[in-house]
Amino acid sequence: MIDRRQHLQQLAALAAASALPAVAADDSDSTFDQDSILKAAADFFGQTTEGLAKVVEKAFKEQGRPNAYVKGEEASAAITVGLRYGDGELLMKGGSSAKVYWAGPSIGFDLGANASKVFTLVYHLPKVSAIYQRFPGVDGSLYYIGGAGINYQRLNGIVLAPIRLGVGLRAGASVGYMHYRREKSINPF
């Protein structure tokens, strides 16, 4: 009886070990690795900075490998109440893509204006159409280094991590949301 139990445990261990490479291969087939994201972001921003590399590294450390990203541009302004508008293209690891527009209000201790390029890492997006909803976020909790900033927006297991490089001055802390849409709208709500 002991030999049979040991044999079953060994078989279970072998089965588990042989399943690990398949899972890892699946993961790499459906998600982007850090080097390809850094290259895509550097190509998009037109430069590689130490700040961009550190922000991407931080996102991978905290969230893992994204399965999509958005390349776009946005403008925002605030005097206590703020507005942000942007547009870009969503690219999924599997090859799907779609145009995406976003707008959103914010409120808080916030003042200034900026225009920026935005490279958003997208985690756990089941399909392209799942991005078209409102994602809450807190802009005061961003991580900022060497000209690149990142914050997180989460909803229903999907995580968006916008990385912004731009011009302007905007300081403070605010809460709000981003409404991602299929079509452009001036309505931020």
Image: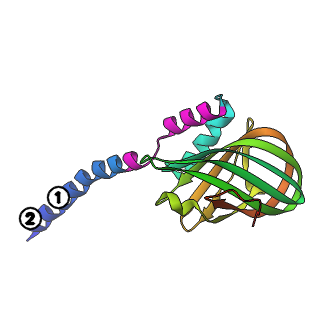
Sequence order check: which comes first, mark 2 or mark 1? 2
Residue lying at the far top of the rendered structure? 47
Q: Secondary structure at mark 2?
A: helix
**Above or below, comparing residue 37 to residue 19 in the picture:** above
Q: Residue at x 75, y 67 (%)?
A: 189
What separation in Å lies between label 2 and label 1 (alpha carbons)?
10 Å
Residue type (three-letter) at the residue carrying disc 1:
Gln
Q: Secondary structure at mark 1?
A: helix
Q: Residue at x 35, y 48 (%)?
A: 24
**Where residue 143 appears, x then y in whole percent?**
71, 48
Q: Is residue 11 left or right of residue 44?
A: left
**Where residue 146 appears, x then y in whole percent?**
73, 35
**Residue tagged by mark 2?**
3
Q: Which residues are magenta?
A: 27-45
**Above or below, comparing residue 48 to residue 142 in the picture:** above
Residue 23 within the magenta-colored segment of the rendering: no
- What predominant SS class does the magenta segment belong to? helix
Q: Is residue 94 left or right of residue 118?
A: left
Residue lying at the far bottom of the rendered structure? 1
Q: Residue at x 9, y 67 (%)?
A: 4
Instruction: Decide which of 78, 66 is in the foreground and name it.
Output: 78
Residue type (three-letter) at the residue carrying disc 2:
Asp
Q: Is residue 12 left or right of residue 3?
A: right
Numbered circle sitting on residue 187: none
Numbered circle sitting on residue 10: 1
Q: Residue at x 53, y 63 (%)?
A: 130
**Where residue 85 appears, x then y in whole percent?**
75, 53
